[in-house]
Amino acid sequence: MTKKGATLIDHTGDLPAAIATQVEKFAGLSEPVEHDGLHILSDLRTGARYLECHIRGSKLVELGTIDVPLDPEEQPEYRANRELVLDHSAFDQMKDDARAKRTFSNIVAEFNVGFDEEHPIKVIGGQHRFEAIRLALDQGIDEHHGIKLYFGLDPEQRLDVQLISNTNIAVSTDLFDRMQETLSGPELRKWCQEVGLLPAGTDFADRRQRSGVITVRAARSFIVNYYRGEKVDPVMFDKCETNPILCKTGERDDEWDATKAAHAKWWNDEKLKNAGTAFAQLIDAQRKAFAKGKKGPVNVDFAEKALNYAVLTAWAFTAGVQYKNNVRLQRHFALKDQAGRDPLNAAALAKGRHKSDAENYRGLGYRTDPKERARLAELFNLQAEDGGGITPVMIDVAIKKYHAKEAQLEVERAKAKAKP
């Protein structure tokens, strides 16, 4: 039964009746210390209503859940918050503190009965503290803990709360990107799953890791560069700028927004799908070439070479350049089928360098800067013309072609500036 009689003190000036009812319900269910004086406040930046109070750990665990989607109506199976890191020393300390009857505070949550009604307290920030409290409760430790509880959030407000609460534990830029993409819709994730860049039912990584799933930044960069490549006339490739870009992370990306605006139904573009599928197969082939059981230790750098951002963007850019030339496009896609060695010939890439490179340059495909991306675009375009796979000679030619082109383009830029 819901306990009645909580005293609400409205500091917002216009508290909707529906939110007042939710606050009453929360108070009756959780029996906060502040039951006789619950102060309802408003975040003036977003208009979100919230209160701060203290409830028993047993009530928090009974009514709460950390299994919280950002978009419960359209994408309920995907989570906005970070995964629990159960093997971190800080979490071990947190569990010890909870067993020692420490009172935790600033657990951020939303009161929402629209889904998973049995757990109306949806924990957004403080998942590790929640888990420590739950484990302590198993040993009979039941202390009061402080929570900041929001009511009646819309999707934009919910994203804002997710971001500010996770910032307390240094939210990664990749998690920020994933949150933004989840809010904008499921298209990018579904496309990546369809072409094989993400396993079925899997979300983007919340932090870039070797051998892990791809990030939103990687997926956006692939699509943006494919369409940038489409704008290049293959006949003019040797005379124009062919520099792939890397999408921004942790902030709004104008290039990604512009690409979506220019290609309203990009996820239905069959040529883009074919490119995505071919690249997913290249990733798989590169990894298999260095799988366990091969001679010698596994070289992770070589195995994950396809997901180097310079490689990814240049490969996608080249697929766009050659999208009308089916012969060259198929040669580009067939790179994954190289026999006898890894498709990207990572060992040869590691030896590729120019006389102007610094002493600490480790070879082509290690860095992600503009020069690296442009060199690799030259390489993949050469390979598409020849179709014989990546060779040391081809790598050397590609690097020299890049520098020769840059020198000529610099001359043209200087001439343009000199004109009255």
Image (spheres, rainbow, N blue to C red):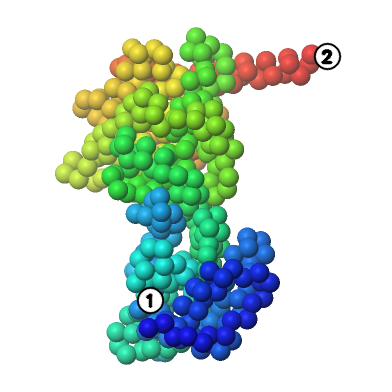
Identified by mark 1, the residue type is: Leu
* Furthest-left residue in this view: 293
Residue occupying image coordinates x 58% and y 45%: 252
Circle number at residue 357: none
- Quick one: 400 or 123, which is closer to the camera? 123
Residue 196 location, quadrant: top left
Q: Is residue 275 above or below residue 181?
A: above
At x 64%, y 67%, the residue is 43
Mark nearest the camera among 1 and 2 is: 1
Residue linked to disc 2: 420
Point 37% across, 71% down: residue? 119
Depth order, front residue of 359/223: 223
**Mark 1 = which residue?**
63
The amino acid on which the numbered mark 2 sits, given as a three-letter code, is Pro
Instruction: Decide if residue 107 is on the left or right side of residue 385.
Output: right
Identify whether 144 is placed above or below 412. Answer: below
| Quadrant in which the C terminus appears | top right
Q: Which image quadrant: the N terminus?
A: bottom left
Towards the viewer: 326 or 58: 58
Counting residues from the N terminus, which is met first, the one under dot 1 or under dot 2?
A: 1
Q: Is residue 53 above or below residue 79?
A: below
Label 1 crowding class (10 Å Cα cut-off): few <14, some 14-19, many 20+?
some
Residue 146 location, x and y as percent? 51, 81
Left or right of 291 in this view: 5:
right
Q: Residue at x 48, y 49 (%)?
A: 183
Circle 2 — which element?
loop
Residue 7 in the image, given as x and y percentages of width and height: 57, 85
Give the Cα separation between the discs numbered 1 and 2. Answer: 73 Å
Asked whether residue 348 is in view, the answer is no
